[in-house]
Amino acid sequence: MALNTNLCFEEEIYLLTVRDFQKMRQADEKITMMTAYDYPSAAQAETAGTDTILVGDSLGNVVLGYDSTTQVTIDDMVHHGKAVRRGAPETFVVVDMPFMSYHVSVEEGIKNATYIFQQTDAQALKLEGASKETVSITNRLTQGGIPVVGHLGLTPQTVNVMGGYRVQGNNETAGQKLLDDAKRLEEAGISLLVLECVPKELAGVITEALTIPTIGIGAGVDCSGQVLVYHDLLQYGSHRLPKFVKSYADFNHAGVEGLKSYVTEVKQKEFPQDSHAYQIKDKQFLPK
C-alpha cells in the first residue's frame, strides 16, 4: 500500500522511503532491488512489486554495448533515469553517478549530483567507493537533502585499478578495510550500502556492524536485501552470467523464437492477414 504525503495540499505518492528501508531492516524484512534502464523494464519491476529500482551505470555494458561502465556519461544517466522514473512513478529510484562525475573535486561532484538528482526526479544517488572525497561528498549531499547509497566491494568504475572483476575482501587485511570503509560511509550519512562480490561471511559481519540496510549482489543471504539486473533475471541479451545470478526466465530463447516466427510468416506471406489490416469503408473511391 502506498504511503501518502500531503505537501501544500498536493498528494505525492511513493511506495517507500529511506525510513521505510530502515524499518524493514529492523523487522528483518528483506529488501528487493532491481537494476533497470528504461521505461518498459521499470514498469514491469514496479508491477512485480520491487521495493526499489537502481538505474545503474552498468547500462553501458548491458544496453549500450560498451566494454565497461567508464564510458557512461552524466547525460546517459539522466536520459535513462528519466525513462525509469516515467515507467515506475511510485517506486523508490536510485541513480548511479557515473565515472569521474564526483572525483575531480568535491564542489564539482556536488554540482553534478544536484543536476542528476533534479533532472531524474530520483529519491537517491549511488556513489562507489569510500575515498576521502567520496566520503566528503556523501556527507555534503546528505546534509543538503540528497540521500546517498554507498557501494563497496567490487566497484566497476575502478575495476582497472582492482585488476579485474574478482571477489573483494578475501583476506583479513582487505576484509577489515571493507568493514572500516562501510562504517565511515555510514557515519557520512548513507541510507543503504550495496556490497558487490564480497564473501558471504564478510557481508554478514558488515551487515551486523551497521545500523543501515545492506543490499547484496554476490554477497550472500545475510545482507538486508538483494539486487540483480533485469536483463540477467530474464536472460534478456545476457549470455555470460556471473555465478551469483539466478535467472527466472529465458527471454533470449523465447524472444529469438518469436522473431524467427515473424520472419518466416512474412517470407511465406502468412502475415499480415486481413485481421491485421484496415478496410476502406467507401469502396467507390478505389481505383478501377
Image (spheres, rainbow, N blue to C red):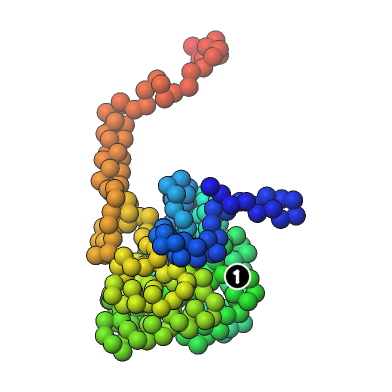
Residue 271, horizontal then vertical, whole percent = 34, 27
Looking at the image, residue 30 sits to the left or right of residue 267; the answer is right
As drawn, the residue found furthest toward the front would be 27
167 or 173, nearer to the observer = 173
Quarter holding residue 269: top left
Residue at 61% over, 62% down: 119
Q: Which type of secondary structure does the marked residue at label 1 adopt?
A: loop
Q: Residue at x 40, y 66 (%)?
A: 224
Q: Residue furthest bottom?
A: 173
Looking at the rendering, which quadrant does residue 156 occupy? bottom left
Q: Residue at x 59, y 74 (%)?
A: 142
Q: Residues within 10 Å of mark 1 (few under 14, many from 20)?
A: many
Residue 15 percent location from the top left of the image: 54, 53
Residue found farthest to the right: 8
Is 158 in front, or is 61? 158
Q: Is residue 73 above or below residue 40?
A: below
Identify the residue under disc 1: 146
List x then y, in percent, for residue 43. 48, 47
The mark tally for this picture is 1
* Left or right of 234 in this view: 42: right
The answer to whether 268 is drawn above or below residue 62 in the figure is: above
Q: Position of residue 146 (x, y in %)?
A: 60, 70
Depth check, front residue: 241 or 67? 241
Name the residue nearer the viewer: 113 or 288. 113
Horizontal side, residue 56 vs residue 111: left or right: left
Task: Look at the image and tell me whether residue 104 can be seen.
Answer: no
Amino acid identity at mark 1: Ile
Q: Which residue does the image show at 37% across and 23% down from the upper left? A: 273
Q: Is residue 132 visible?
A: yes
